[in-house]
Image (cartoon, rainbow, N blue to C red):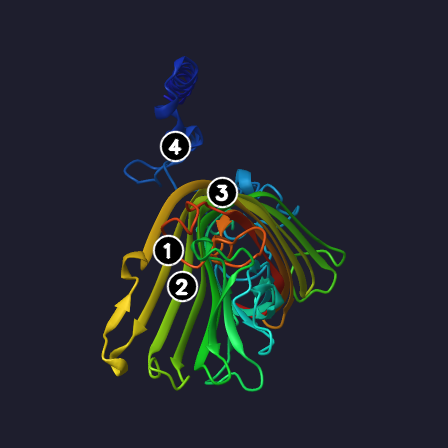
Amino acid sequence: MKFAWTRMKGVCQLLLGLAMTVGGRGLAAEINTDGFAKLAESSSAAPSGKSEASPFKDESAANPARAVPIEPVVPACSPCSSSCAAGIARCDNDCFSGAPGRVWFSGEYLHWWTSGAHLPPMVSTLDPNNPMPATTLTTVFGNRDIRDGSHDGYRMDLGMWLDGNHCWGLEADYFDVTGRRDGYDSGLTAGIPTPIARAFFDPASGITQGSINAIGYPNLYAGRVTVDTLDYFQSAGLWFRHQLRASEWSTNGGEVNWTDHSARTFRLDAIGGYRFARLIDTVNERDDSVDISGTATTGNTFTSINNYRTVNNFNGCELGLNTVFTAGRWSLDVVTKAAFGANNQYASLYNLNATDTTNTGGGVTSNAATALQEFSRNRFSWIPELTVTGGFQVTDHLKVTAGYDLLYWTAVVRAADQIAVQPTTGYPYGSLVGTTLPPFAWNESHFLAQGLRLGAEVRF
C-alpha cells in the first residue's frame, strides 16, 4: 500500500508540473505542492480516522511581502515656468517667486512737466499820451508759451495673475493730470496809471498795424479783462501680461525668498492691450468795459468773449515689454510700450461781441451770428511711453515705489494754436467769420509729458 501511494505521489507531482508549464499557472499557483508532500507523509504514518491540518495554510505571517522601492515623481514645470531651480518642486503652485501675492494695487502721486502751446498777445498796455499806432502796444499777457510748466496728478494700477505660475496676468491703470491755471486778471480799472487794452487785427478797419479795444483808459473807459487757460490730461489702459523669460537664484541656495539679501530674480513679460487718452485744452478771454467819457454815450457797456477749446480723444492698441529685476528687498521695473490708433480732434471757436446802449435809450446789439464754430476730424496717432520704477519691499504685502515717466503723443491740437493770427502783426483776428478772417486751418502739434512718481504697492 505504501508503494502504491508513493507512485501516486509521483504522478500527481508530474501532472502539476505539466499544468504549470502549459499555462495552468493560475490554478497551480493556488495549490501548495508542499502541502501534498506533507499530506502524503502524514497519511502514511497517521492512524486511520485521524484528521490532519489543511495543506492550504496561510504563510503570509512567516514570509511577509517585500517592499518594492518606487522613485518619487517630481512635477515638471509648465512651458512658461521652465526656470524652476533644480530640486525645487514648486511648479504646481508658483514656479517663479518674484513679488509675493497674486493680486496687487498701487497708488501714486504724479509731478509732471508738459509741453505747451504758443499763445498770441491777449492783453496789452500802451502810452496814454500816444495810443496810436497799435505797434506801440506792450504785451501784458500772451506772446509766449503756456501750459509748459509743472502739473500735479495721480495714478492707480490694479492687476492680478490668472494662474499660479504667474505666467498670465491682467492689468489696468488710470492716471489724471490737471494743469495749473495760467491766466491774467486786470481787476476793475479805469486805466490809471496804466491803460489796459486788447489788440487785434481787423482788415476791414483799414489799419494795417492793428486795432485796439480799450478796456481801461483814463477818462474814457473803466473795465476788466480776464484770460484763463487750462489743460487736462487723462489716460486709461487694459492689457494682458505674458511671461517670456524668468529666472531666480540665490548664493545661499534653497528656495528664493525676498527676505534673503542675496536672492535675485529676473523676468521679462510681453504686454498687449487697449489704451485710451484724452487731452482737453482751453483758452478763454473776456473783457467788459463801460463808457465814462461824460458824453452822450456815457453808460454804454461793451462785452467781448473769445473762447477756444480743443479736445483730443485717442483709442488704440498698445504693445510693449515689461522687465523686472529684484535683488533682495529692492526691485527695478522698466516698461517700454507704444500705443497706435486714431485720434479724434475737435475744436470749437466761440466769439461774441455785444454792445448795451440801454442807458442811452438804445438796446443790446451783438454779433451773435458768429458765436460758435465747431470742427472735427480723425487722424492717425501714436503714443510711445517709458516708465522706470524703483521699489523697496517693506513687508510681504507692502512695497514703496518711486519712478520716472516719459510720454510723447503725436498729432494733437492745442487751443492756443487754433487762434487765427495775422502773420505780420502777430495779433489775433478781430472776428471769426466774414472777410476779416481766413478760412479755418488745423494746426497740429505734439504733447510731451515727463515727470516723477511717488507711491506704494499692496499685494495679497
Distance (Cα) linking label 4 and label 2: 120 Å
Give residue 348's mark: 1
Disc with the residue nearer the chain's start (1 vs 3): 1
Q: Nearer the viewer, mark 1 or mark 3?
A: 1
Please tell me whether residue 261 is drawn above or below residue 315 in the rendered image: below
State the SS at label 2.
strand
State the SS at label 1.
strand
Disc with the residue nearer the chain's start (2 vs 1): 2
Distance (Cα) linking label 1 and label 4: 116 Å
State the SS at label 4.
helix
Give residue 291's quadrant in the image: bottom left
Distance (Cα) linking label 2 and label 1: 8 Å
Check if mark 1's residue and mark 3's residue have beta carbons within 8 Å. Answer: no
Determine which residue is flagged by label 3. Answer: 381
State the SS at label 3.
strand
| Residue type, mark 1 in image | Ser
Distance (Cα) linking label 4 and label 3: 101 Å
Distance (Cα) linking label 1 and label 3: 21 Å
Check if mark 2's residue and mark 1's residue have beta carbons within 8 Å. Answer: yes
Q: Nearer the viewer, mark 4 or mark 2?
A: 2
